[in-house]
Image (cartoon, rainbow, N blue to C red):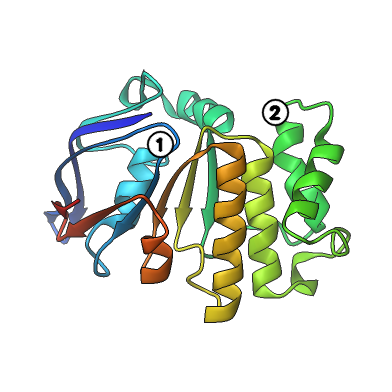
């Protein structure tokens, strides 16, 4: 499902180049659950962004589902993400002017789905928010907002779900509930799951763990 070879990322800083990723090569099979772990600043979120096509590598390649992301322009990558990829972020990324239901419906409507409403309701029920669908993000707790984000991610039926610190802004008990929901839906949908986390409990739930240290893949 995902293959990257000699992936490198450098950014200009104070007249020099900061090397964030230093030749990462890895493969992730369809349906696998993989945690990317490591200290802050080790390059975890940068790697996730490159694998998801949110950013471009300085060198190396990322191939997803036989598509070389480096061969696509920005519009092509956006179209690819809309078709194949779902996201769950630490900061939820909900639109404050839309209800929970509308937040889940929006990406479905942008894809031209004719049953955006029923699909959104189904996934909000799956994350146990059937009584909060008409609430706005500011009327929801952090855990409820993250459940909306999980419902939104799965509603598009992505082949791959990328999650960046999905429990990072939540207390331990709420984070554990999000983990259960995330993995339950993942089993049902057969999605390939790649997540960045500092949460060792969450990482242990994954089939594989990739550890980064100063931009290098040091253990697998």
Residue 14 image offset from top left, x and y in percent: 16, 61
Residue 38 image offset from top left, x and y in percent: 25, 64
Q: Which residue is mark 1?
A: 53
Mark 1: few, some, or many residues within 10 Å (few <14, many ≥20)? many
Query: Does residue 27 appear to the left or right of 80 in the view shown?
Result: left
Looking at the picture, tell me which residue is in the foreground, 199 or 9. Answer: 199
User: Secondary structure under badge 2?
Assistant: loop
In 3D space, how far apart are the residues under numbered discs 2 and 1 (Cα atoms)?
18 Å
Q: Are marks 2 and 1 in contact (CB under 8 Å)?
A: no
Q: Please report the residue visible at 45 percent of the width from the left and 36 percent of the height from the top.
A: 31
Quadrant position of the N terminus in the picture = top left
Q: Is residue 124 above or below residue 204?
A: above
Residue 75 image offset from top left, x and y in percent: 50, 26
Looking at the picture, tell me which residue is in the foreground, 206 or 215. Answer: 206
Residue 70 visible (yes or no): yes
Residue 199 visible (yes or no): no
Any mark on residue 135, and which? none
Of callouts 2 and 1, which one flags the residue occurring earlier in the amino acid sequence?
1
Looking at the picture, tell me which residue is in the foreground, 10 or 83. Answer: 83
Q: Please report the residue visible at 33 percent of the width from the left and 19 percent of the height from the top.
A: 71
Any mark on residue 111, and which? 2
Looking at the picture, tell me which residue is in the foreground, 168 or 172. Answer: 172
Q: Please report the residue visible at 54 percent of the width from the left and 26 percent of the height from the top.
A: 79
Mark 2: few, some, or many residues within 10 Å (few <14, many ≥20)? few
Query: Does residue 130 appear to the left or right of 57 in the view shown?
Result: right
């Amino acid at each position: 499902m995902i293959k990257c070879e000699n992936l490198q990322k450098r950014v200009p800083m104070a007249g020099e180049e900061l090397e964030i990723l230093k030749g990462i090569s890895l493969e992730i099979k369809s349906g696998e659950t993989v945690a990317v772990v490591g200290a802050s600043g080790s390059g975890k979120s940068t790697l996730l962004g490159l694998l998801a096509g949110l950013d471009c590598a300085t060198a190396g390649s990322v191939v997803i589902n036989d598509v070389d992301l480096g061969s696509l322009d920005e519009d092509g990558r956006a179209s690819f993400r809309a078709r194949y990829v779902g996201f769950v972020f630490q900061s939820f990324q909900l639109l404050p002017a839309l209800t929970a239901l509308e937040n889940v419906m929006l990406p479905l409507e942008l894809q031209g789905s004719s049953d955006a409403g029923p699909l959104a309701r189904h996934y909000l029920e799956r994350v146990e928010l059937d009584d909060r669908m008409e609430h706005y993000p500011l009327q929801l707790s952090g855990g409820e907002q993250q459940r909306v984000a999980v419902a939104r991610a799965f509603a598009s039926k992505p082949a791959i779900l990328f999650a960046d610190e999905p429990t990072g802004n939540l207390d331990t008990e709420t984070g554990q509930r999000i983990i259960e929901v995330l993995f339950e839906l993942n089993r049902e949908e057969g999605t390939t799951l790649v997540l960045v986390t500092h949460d060792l409990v969450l990482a242990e739930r994954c089939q594989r763990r990739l550890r980064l240290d100063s931009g290098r893949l040091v253990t697998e």
